[in-house]
Amino acid sequence: MTLGESPRLVLLLALGDDELILGHRHSEWTGWVPHLEEDLAFSSIAQDEMAHARLLYGLALESLGEGWDEDRLALGREPGEYRNAVLCERPNRDWGYSLARQFLYDTADDVRTQSLLGSSWKELTEILTLVRMEETYHLEHARTWFRRLAGGPVAAREHLAAGLEGALGESLAIFEPLPGEGSLLASGDLPAPSSELLAEWLGGVGEELEAVSLDYVLERHAQVGEMVPTASGEMEEERPALSVPGVERVGGRWVHRGGFAGAGGRAGRHSEDFPALWEDLTGLYRAFPGATW
Amino acid sequence: MVKSPDDPLIPAVWEALAGVRDPEIPPCSITDLGIVGDVRATDDGAIEIDLLPTFAGCPALDVIREDCETAVADAAPGREVHVRFVTSPPWTTDRITPAGRAALRTYGVAPASGEEPRICPYCGSRKTLQESQFGPTLCRATHYCEACRNPFEAFKPKLIALQVRRPS
């Protein structure tokens, strides 16, 4: 019983798995953030993201056969069947990295879901209309802290900058083209190609970084380390693309110039960090099939 | 399934639903919160109820659904009852009725008004600050009243037209 590769399913899993896996990482902060309000914030954002994943999986189930339910879709897949961006599965490191990642992910998700409101797939636009109302608060959280930390003191700014440097390269691969993207564009399910969304997002993030004089992070971006996928095998011909991320400033605006750090997630190829997360996330489900609580 | 809009039991079903509470906001009935989207009867007499979740990740949803099933089973004996959550139309804070807003205030929660700063539910002052967008439940943020020095909660405005504020 395999999931198949229908382009619509790939799109839903890319959107849903990003939310599930990043939601799991956010939830790891529960009880640990050295600030009560932020403990609540990351826990609440995690709860929202997992609910959004659930809505998207619910839509995916309509096209899947007997034997699939939302728990199995969330917890009962093999590692190579998850299509989240590699950025989402990386460990939290410190709070500066987690916040930087939340800022980069949620601004990217905003661009992506805004575009998808123009999709011809009515059920998806209904879900995303609801999701975007809740995401408003995630964006406000990310931008509030982004500006506050960027404004100093020095230690706060350094933590934010280090977090951005660590997360920025791989955040571009949120817009790694989806397998089957051509047919999604032709059917109108996808109103705009990933490359167009990436250009819009990167331009906007570049402006936000420049506004607080942190755009040097973009200049250093090409030094982000190479990703080594281990979860599901072969590197094959994709390998050259994995190590040549790049952005440059053209005509006053930051643009992508080919290649992604941390690519492969949309095709189910994950980083060395994924297996441990997968074991943690799915352990109970695999040990006690059908368990309820 | 053909709808039977004229089923005589529909008003009784609404009345039963008005007795169901959100366990996280006990003074306010779910009809006043605006989370009952539609009540229908099918041609074979089953009662169908569409609920609109306030926030998709609200852990009280399953409790609310079960409470609805129990309440409606009592009001419509012998009928099949189907309660489901739907995503369209999306729930917005505009759906909270005036009675619901009053009930929220008695519970120390400022109803969503779209106004900033929020009005303190205890003393009515506007001299308040938002402490965090997040609070004890997904649908509420934490605020502080500088006039009566009480912390209070406020329903997060949830509006389709609410645009993301980009930095200028």
Image (cartoon, coloured by chain):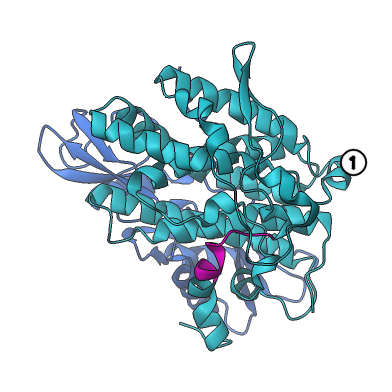
Figure quadrant of residue A185: top right
Q: Is residue B138 visible?
A: no
Find chain B in the image and tell me its colour.
blue
Crowd around label 1: few <14 · some 14–19 · many ≥20 (10 Å)? few
Q: Is residue B23 among what the camera can see?
A: yes
Q: Where is residue A241 drawn, in percent x and y?
A: 72, 43
Q: Is residue B78 magenta?
A: no
The region drawn magenta spans A269-278
Which residue is at 88% across, 46% downward? Answer: A183
Position of residue A20 measured from the top left corner of the image (x, y, whole percent): 55, 60
B159 or A194, which lies in front? A194
Q: Position of residue B49 (x, y in %)?
A: 61, 65
Extreme left residue here? B148
Residue B118, compared with residue A63, is above or below; it is above
The chain painted cyan is A
The residue that disc 1 covers is: A186
Residue lying at 30% horizontally and 53% vertically, measured from the top left:
A39
Task: Residue at 49%, 42% (x, y): give it.
Answer: A167
The C terminus of chain A: image quadrant: bottom left
Between B4 and B52, the residue placed more toward the observer is B52
